[in-house]
Every structure is written in structure tokens, then in C-alpha cells.
Image (cartoon, rainbow, N blue to C red):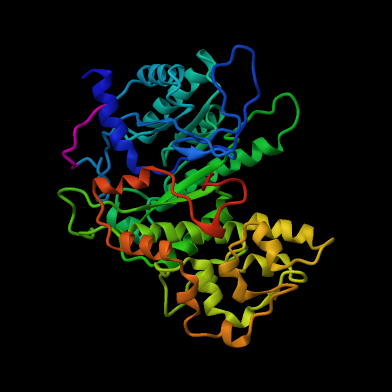
Amino acid sequence: MDVGDKLRILADSAKYDVSCASSGAKRGGRDGALGSNSGCGICHSYTPDGRCVSLLKILLTNYCIYDCVFCVNRISSDVPRARFTPQEVVQLTLDFYRRNYIEGLFLSSGIIQSPDYTMEQLIAVARSLRSEHRFNGYIHLKTIPGASDLLLAEAGRWADRLSANIELPTVKDLATLAPEKDSATIQNTMTSVREHIVEAEEARGPKRIRYAPAGQSTQMIIGATATTDATILTTASQLYGDYKLKRIYYSAFSPIQHADPRLPVQAPPLVREHRLYQADWLMRFYEFGAADLTTATEPNLDLSQDPKLVWALRNRWYFPVDVNTATREQLLRVPGMGYRNVQRILSIRRYHRLTMADLHKLKIITRRARPFIVTGDNRPAAADLDGVNLAQRLVVPQQMQLFEASATAITGESNGLQGRPRSPTGEARPPSGRARRR
């Protein structure tokens, strides 16, 4: 099989892994170095100035010794198989970079022979690019759960980011759909990477090394089991706290041919994945807790409205808040008010009493924020805030179209969306750019 056929098979097999985006890492310029990742996003993501850039996203091989029922590359699958040598991946990366097709590499793999053997093959690619070809672009390597700590320590020397997929939200889910994998082994791998990152950050002197400067991330599949959004968000909160992850990626389950009866027949609506990303932003940047976003009676996120608006409607007693006197935490809870604009409000109001016109100039979604805030020229009536039709008035037609289209989506090739960056809309954007990153 020639390299072109391998590339077609292994690039297609890699599309289900969405855990790659902008790196947030910078490598010092070196004379003669090939490539740069300064300020660059990866894999059809966006830089802070809005440019869209990409990377070569492939598997080293789609052979795998495991039989995870949700995975298209499981050992019992009848998909076409292929395998690159490390040298072929290195040459492809360099050729694609010189043609200006890519600005980095995302490399994962099925498990072949053993975790250690597979990890050695991935490291060989990154080591050759860095040391032999002086490649200075972005490299994201998948770590293989169960690989030795020595191999994990070396992987971080060559890669900008490492990631180990948690796969599914709970230990029970993993035992049901991937019984050959062990949740404790995955968590031990993430712990090891975290410890190496901390060690590198605390090191001083000439022997200091750079270890995975863009941190680590993970991915979990949603919709393959009946696990609720409340459980998913609780798991995500624990992962952020325990391993200081840069990102958690949520991938809507895609039905595959000859599926196991333990799997659902249809995929979850893509809007559910979108709402989970919005909730994730709220936990990371807006000081929401996992318990704030769902309730015991409503354990799943509302698909028709963004989580921040749902929280505000559920907690109307919290409002209105005065933008000229409210705390940062209070302002972050206001629908339509973004992270960066809260920072601007806190700065501007020291010199000027804000009005609705000022908020409009800051590009705040005043239509959504108005019922929840007090300004110099706006004080909502109690009847307005308590009105039963407030939710309908605040949901814009475009959001309803998104909900109606996504709620009925059946994945297949149409689920190619999960290979592209989809940023949360409105105020749930991250603070550092126009699309979801890191």
C-alpha cells in the first residue's frame, strides 16, 4: 500500500478524535529552525486575530488490540487497515508544511503490540521532527494509557501538548463499553503527565527543560450511554481540578455499522454537544459550578436555551444587578454579558457611570441583558423580570433554528462537524479569542 492510500485511511480514522485545537505554546526562535507555532491555532482552529489554520491530523495506525464497542477502529471492526512507519509520518509532516498545507501535527494511534511499543513509535516521530529536522511547529501527541512513566517523560520533551482520552464519563460506562480498558490506568497516565508538567514549571537553572508547554487535554464521548449531563459536568469539574487540564473535548457519539446492541441506534443531537461546551466555558471562565447548571429534576441541559440564560431564569431572585456597583461574580452571571466585557465594565465604571448606550458600544447583547440589569438609565420592572414569557422573548430566532435543526440530526457523514472547531455563541466564548481554544 502506497503512502497516499495510507493517508486516506488513517486521516479518515482520525476524524473522530476532536481533542486538538490551538496550542497556546511558544517555542523560542532558533537559527535555521523549520516552522513556528507562535500565536497559531491548530486543526482548523482560530488565532486571536481570527485566522484559521490547520494541522496534519492522522493515526499512526488504525490497528488496535482493544475491542471498545463505540470505536470504529476496534479489533473486531471490518474497516480497511493501514499503518505508517515513523519515517513516513515525519516525511509527510515536512512535505505538507513546506507546501503551506499545515502548521503542525496531531498524532494518535491504535494500540499495537503493547502500550509501551505504541508510545515508543509516537515518540520516535516527534523526536525525529525536533532533533533531526529542527521542526519548530506545533506537535500534539496522544499518550497511551499504561505506557511507562519514562516514556511519558520523554514524550513531553518533544510535544507541545499531550492528551489521554478519558473515553466515557463514568467508570461504569467504561466497564460496559470498553471492558479491556481501565479507568485507573487512564487516570494514572494523566497524573503522571501532570506531575511532569509541575516538575518542569518548578525547575530552575540550566537543566530546566520544557515539558508539554501547552499542557494536557482529554476527550469524552457523550450519548453512547444514558449518562446525564449533570454527571458529565461533575466528571469534567473533577478532571479540571485533579489534573489542571487545558481543555476537555466532548464528542457526540456517532453510530457505526455493525454496532453492538449495547449502543444506541441514533446519535444524540449535536446541539447537546454544543450546550456541554457552553456549560464547560461557564465552569472554567464564569465561576459556575457543575451543580449550578442542572438540577435534580432536570439533570440534562436545556437544548433550546444556553445554560447561562437557563440559570438566570431559574434564579430570578438574583436579579437585577446594578452594573455600576455589582461585583465581578455578579456581573459574570448576567446573560448577554461576556468575560472580557465584565473586565471592561469594572475598569470603565471607576471613571464613568454606565448607561445602556455604553453597554451597546461594548457589544454586549443588551436585548438579553436588559431585564437582568440596572444602569443609569434602565431599571427593569418587577413584572418584566417575573413575566412567564420572558424566556420566549430572549431566545432569538437563529437560536431556535439551531435547536430545531440539531435536535433532529442523525449522524453519519453529516457528523463531520465533530472534526471541525465549533465555538459556543454569545457570552460563553473563552476570554482569549473568537473561537474555543485550548
Is residue 63 toward the left or the right of residue 344 in the image? left
Q: Residue placed farthest to the right in the image? A: 351
Is residue 397 toward the left or the right of residue 407 in the image? right
Q: How many marks?
A: 0
Is residue 173 toward the left or the right of residue 206 in the image? left
Stretch of the chain drawn in magenta = 76-82
Question: Residue 21: horizontal and vertical position, in percent?
Answer: 49, 40
Quadrant showing the N terminus: top left
Residue 112 shows up from this direction: no
Q: Main secondary structure of the magenta part?
A: loop
Residue at image location 50% in from the left, 72% down from the top: 394
Frontmost residue, 311 versus 170: 311
- Please check the rendered image and state whether residue 258 is part of the magenta-colored stretch, yes or no: no
Against 234, is 58 above or below?
above
Against 434, is 238 above or below?
below
Quadrant showing the C terminus: top right
- Please check the rendered image and state whether residue 81 is part of the magenta-colored stretch, yes or no: yes
Residue at image location 34% in from the left, 55% down from the top: 174
Residue at image location 27% in from the left, 28% down from the top: 8
Residue 125 found in image quarter? top left
